Image (spheres, helix red, strand yellow):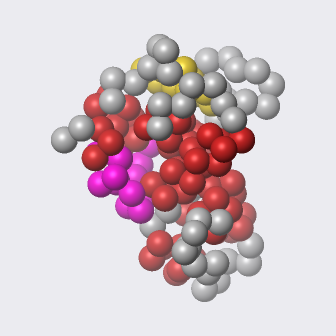
Amino acid sequence: MDWQHGAAALEGTSPTLSDLLDLCLQAELEVLDAPLPPGWLGAYDHACRRILLAPWLTPVEQRSVLAHELGHALRMHVGSSAADERAAERFAARLLIDPAALRAACAWARDDAELADELGVTVDVVRAYRALPGASAA
């Protein structure tokens, strides 16, 4: 099974950071902690097949940012545009959020921050999921 199919199989299953790192191995993507420009949490270097993560990220941020950067790798983005960033964030949202878990959390969560905490993702990932076509606003 190629790594794109592996990514599709993980969609909506709330994969762990270890699952994402295994997917990177399948894709022959190197993942490194590295200093990045101010405001950057991660980066994908298509030419080197490398994902860079800021070394100070929390585990939740690592998981969310790695999924985002995998979205860039899957789509073979070179450089960055607003459209590429939205596509990568949508990929991360579909990959990391289990729709059933989101529905259950929406029954009690007061805001996106509480949803993110419950789902183990960043608020940006929750908001990207809610913006998906056909996604429940929950």
Residue 66: in sight, yes or no?
no
For the question of whether residue 42 can be seen, the reply is: yes
Whether residue 135 sits left or right of residue 17 in the image: it is right
**Which residue occupies 62% across, 40% down?**
84
Quadrant position of residue 136 = bottom right
Q: Position of residue 126 (x, y in %)?
A: 63, 62
Residue 1 position in % (x across, y down) = 19, 41
Give the side of residue 108 with respect to residue 9, left or right: right
Front position in the image: 42 or 48: 48
Q: Residue at x 49, y 15 (%)?
A: 47
Q: Which residue does the image show at 45% across and 54% down from the upper left?
A: 95
Q: Is-magenta flag for residue 10?
A: yes
Q: Is residue 24 left or right of residue 126?
A: left
Compared to residue 48, the image places residue 97 above or below, namely below
Q: How many marks?
A: 0
State which region is magenta: 6-17
Q: Quadrant of the C terminus?
A: bottom right
| Left or right: residue 37 compared with residue 116 | right
Query: Is residue 79 found inside the magenta-colored segment of the image?
Result: no
Vertical placement of residue 13 versus 104, above or below: above
Query: Residue 118, image x and y in percent?
Result: 58, 66
* Camera-side residue of 59 and 126: 126
Q: Residue furthest left?
A: 1
